[in-house]
Amino acid sequence: MKVSVGHKLGERDVTPEAVYLNRRQYLKASAVGAAALLAPTVKASLATGSADPAPLWLQTQNNQAAPSPFSSTEKLTPYEYVTGYNNFYEFGTGKDDPEKHGQDFRPHPWQITVSGLAEGTGTFDLEDLLKGLAVEERIYRLRCVEAWSMVIPWLGVPMAALLQRLKPLSSARFVSFETVYRPEEMPGQGSFFAAIDYPYIEGLRMDEAMHPLTLMATGVYGRSLPNQNGAPIRLIVPWKYGFKSIKSIRKITFTARQPQTTWQKANAREYGFYANVNPSVDHPRWSQAEERRLPSTLFASNRVPTLPFNGYADAVAGLYQGMDLTKYY
Amino acid sequence: MDKVLLTRWFWWILLLPFVFAGARVVQVIWYDPSALGPDPAQALVDLFGTTALWFLCAVLFVTPARAVIGVRWLTRQRRALGVACFGYALLHWLSYAGLLLEWQWQNLGQDLLNRPYIIVGFLAGLMLLLLAGTSNNTSVRLLGRRWRILHRLVYPAALLVLVHMFWVARSDYTEVILYSVVVLLLLLYRWRYSAKST
């Protein structure tokens, strides 16, 4: 998907390829979701009880979130399950471990180190990186590779807005992300028999990263991200399996070559680089044809058919035109 | 304590995990739908699977317990332990097939053909079924010498259960390795013990 650009233009004058290629999908999604703009964000209806522990600047920025036209109108998974039942192996492998063992983690102050093929490399305070970026509320489906799913109201900034600020060079074709490594605060990182290496690494192709649906989340349910959900900042790529959406991001690196991700390294046959939600490509352990939309009940497991690209095919299928998705799974 | 009375009490103890699970189910249905989390069916599958594994370890522990620590009364309860192990394994399968897959036979068949961990789990289950089905006095009498040989199936069944667990684990093998060490030590002891006694 190479597009030649004018030779007289400098790096900063170029419309990012992904944004350009997706302009039609962007417009289409905007039209569909226009009604959502009139609705208030989810925070209005939420009573979490506990105070938001994030610093004031982040609370303020999150509080100004505007509803996004990309939001789903499906029924939300309750807050207690979004924050009490998830995978974040840095805090343990049980679904309730992240909430149980995540409370000693200190997400503030937070810095992100940017390196590789970009003009804006260096180490930045999170506050400076996010300053002036408009936070949106995006209600996305989250599809776990383990064949369950949730509907979650994230707060965050479009990844494209953040990455443009870092001025990636045109030679940057991939961007990789790294989770913070603090075994003293993250007991799972010290596990002796862990099958995956820490720090956790994920990556995207640049056009995937710059896609309008890709989000850098700073909050959920109207408040800042709880530790167990990847505080203070995490990736959300709604058309990929959940493990792509790396949490507590400490490093961003722009590269020319495809980075090797944690799960690929652990088991390349089971986890590919792309990890797009695809009902017709089974994981060796789980059929991906259906998913259980949580919460389920004892006698109604709430199975729904899994959609290609998790239902975001109209917006993102073009990114993978001509690729054999059974090979690039 | 009276031996018959002990045996009777023992059966009730074996039912405790079932009573516990039943209480949670009642709680989920009538009082608090979130008592087992957002995925209650999966929670029951895990609970019954782990319980079956514990009883499997207990069965394998009977002989070493007698020989090493001199605990004799446990030998009388071995049949109960074995039947309980099968019972919880059956509940493990029933909650998987009935609650998670809602008896969709096509999905059950697909899983059985394509998922290695389901295949070995199912095989182990069939072995336990055979053992539980021949655990009554009549079978012991009818099968005679062959009964002992048949019931050595518990060893391959235990190994298959471990393989089942290894293939279920996604990222951390700590728990599986702990159970494996326990089971393998018990098997190793058995192997040496029987080699000496013959």
Image: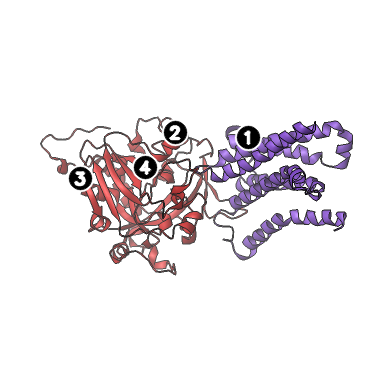
Chain colours: A red, B purple
Front residue (pair B136, B186): B186
Q: Earlier in the sequence, mark 2 or mark 4?
A: 4
Residue at numbered disc 4: A202
| On screen, residue B54 above or below B116 | below
Q: What kind of residue is marked 2?
A: Ala
Q: Earlier in the sequence, mark 3 or mark 4?
A: 3
Residue at numbered disc 1: B119
Chain ID for label 2? A
Q: What kind of residue is marked 1?
A: Ile
Residue B157 visible (yes or no): no
Point 36% across, 38% down: residue: A317
Q: Residue A268's mark?
A: 2
* Residue B194, quarter of the rendered image: top right
Front residue (pair A227, A34): A227
Task: Kindly state the secondary structure of the residue where label 3 is placed.
Answer: loop
The CA distance from mark 3 to mark 1 is 51 Å
Chain ID for label 3? A
- Are the residues flagged by discs 2 and 4 in contact, CB closer than 8 Å? no
Judge if badges 2 and 3 mark residues of a common chain: yes
Measuring from the top left, give residue A164's x and y in whole percent.
Answer: 22, 47
- Are the residues flagged by discs 3 and 4 in contact, CB closer than 8 Å? no
